[in-house]
Amino acid sequence: MSDVSSSRVHASRVLASRVLALWCPDWPAVAAAAQADLPATHPVVVTSANRVVACSATARASGVKRGLRRREAQARCPEVHVALADTDRDARLFEPVVSAVAAIAPGVEVLRPGLLVLAARGVGRYFGTEHRAAERLIDEASAAGVECQIGIADELSTAVVAARYAQVVPRGGGAGFLAPLPVAELSAEPSMSAADRGELVDLLRRLGLRTIGDFAALSPGDVASRFGTDAVLAHRSARGEPERPPSARALPPDLDVEYLCDPPIDRVDAAAFAGRGLAEQLHTKLAAAAVACTRLLVHASTGNGENLSRIWRCAEPLTPEGTADRVRWQLDGWITGRSENKPTSAITVLRLEPIEVVAAGELQLGLWGSVGDEDERARRVLVRVQGLLGGESVLGGVLSGGRGPAERITLRPLGDELVPMSNPSDPWPGRLPEPAPAAVIETRPTVTLMDRAGTGIGVTDRGVFDASPSRLRWGTKEWELTGLAGPWPVDERWWDSGHASTGPTARAQVVLDDERALLLVFDEGRWRVEGIYE
């Protein structure tokens, strides 16, 4: 092919592949505020595992940021509203935004709640220019009650980054736009990267590559030979090169799955149950065809003849659980959402249709031997164990409230709802300080804490050591102590004679000369090992 014809092919592809991304900043916090009927200016944080995972702009202005502990966030911003992370809530409240955009711009694809993409060429022609199209979409989102930013670029990943900066990138200018940005932008959007993209970014920083342009300057051969497959995809994005699926192929026939709802579905729990069953059927067909789905169409028909559909795009092939989650999110948004397109009657037909697939043979196999089924296979094995040994033979842990490490774990049989014994978000004065032990020993073996002379050490009624600890004996072995913290007195339910202790109770942390660290508890005149730190 001549240079002239090659340039024409490239130019035609650029014109056809312009992508518009609509991003709602801090969407989990926005959705939490909307559910609590709070004004947009009220500070909000969303937490998971007692850590901040999202926060509003007003909360950030008070010093709150992601990664902070909940208590520290509340100390920096006392009036902040705290909400737990809830993907169902995020997806349900995002559906009116998607519907508002889809009403004037067909072909909307949802990457995750808070982020959607569509082809920019059609909407740009309809409204005259890409800038006018962006302004109109922002107005539509504002009418739905949310703020958003628009990014337009030649490639999908560049458009998503551009949306974070509210930029319309000129044709062919993707690499120049990305070059001065920090390399962390390559992992800023989880729906557009592999789960371990953050590790790649950390490695690039340690190598001195601070910007995307520094990374793009590396030769493709060096990246391919020194890093993994995801790094190659990230490098192509950094260079603004045309993106392509890892192994796009024509759709095999008869991959759609359909469920005739009898009785019709008008509740979210019934819809979620039907969606999970359809997801299992779909992935059975995909496995038989040796493919995996990366773009999924969820379609529903109602008793009044209404047809609803939405496309979900994923960076990595969907698993059965991932498919079931997206179906549940979408049905929740349709059934209980506030969209003007909310169905007027119950759902009678539910259909899942893979829009884009990749070859399963080119994907890395999971631990249990197949693509996307490792969790389900493991679950089947555990259920089989339950059938042989009883329901209490397989337990799962959930974070609970308490002061000691054992108290903060509630074990429930597999299949039961993971409800903690007590609320971990409640205040627990005297709780063991962080970090928590990596392993909690249920049997609590007895050890001896000694001073320099080899005399055993205990805890006085005032909650202090009766001598200076120097050594620890566990069985027949002894270690020198290189670190010590505590003791912390434990005084609980002193009014209850059934829980009254025969003497002082306290906890302490010790570091041994082999660099191991132990959590000790003193009770009934003896030291016991309660946990081991890594």
Image: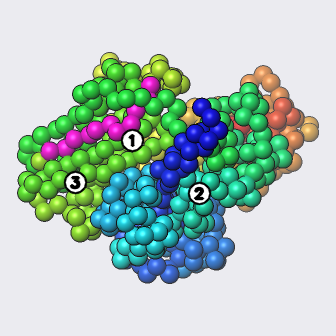
- Residue 62, by quadrant, is bottom right
Q: Nearer the viewer, residue 403 or 121?
A: 121
Distance from the alpha carbon under mark 3 to that under mark 1:
17 Å
- The residue identified by callout 2 is 171
Q: Amino acid at mark 2?
A: Arg
Residue 38 inside the magenta-drawn segment: no
Magenta span: 349-359
Q: Is residue 387 left or right of residue 358?
A: left
Q: Give yes or no for contact between labels 3 and 1 (Cβ–Cβ under 8 Å).
A: no
Q: Residue at x 46, y 79 (%)?
A: 40
Q: Residue furthest right?
A: 452
Residue 522 shows which numbered tag? Answer: none
Kindly indicate the quadrant of the structure image that contains residue 7.
top right
Residue topped by disc 3: 308
Q: Are marks 2 and 3 in contact (CB under 8 Å)?
A: no
Q: Nearer the viewer, residue 318 or 290?
A: 290
Q: Residue at x 34, y 30 (%)?
A: 251
Q: Which quarter of the rendered picture does the N terminus lie within?
A: top right
Neighbours of disc 2 within 10 Å: few (<14), some (14-19), many (20+): some
**Where residue 100 appears, x then y in whole percent?**
32, 67
Which dot, 2 or 3, sits closer to the camera?
2
Residue 61, image x, y percentages: 63, 77
Q: Residue at label 1?
A: 295
Relative to 429, residue 235 above or below: above
Name the kind of residue labelled 1 in the image: Arg
Alpha-carbon distance for marks 1 and 2?
A: 26 Å
Determine whether the residue tagged by mark 1 lies in a helix, strand or loop. strand
In screen coordinates, is 512 left or right of 383? right
Q: Secondary structure at mark 2?
A: loop
Q: Quadrant of the C terminus?
A: top right
The residue positioned 24% from the left and 28% from the top of the image is 254
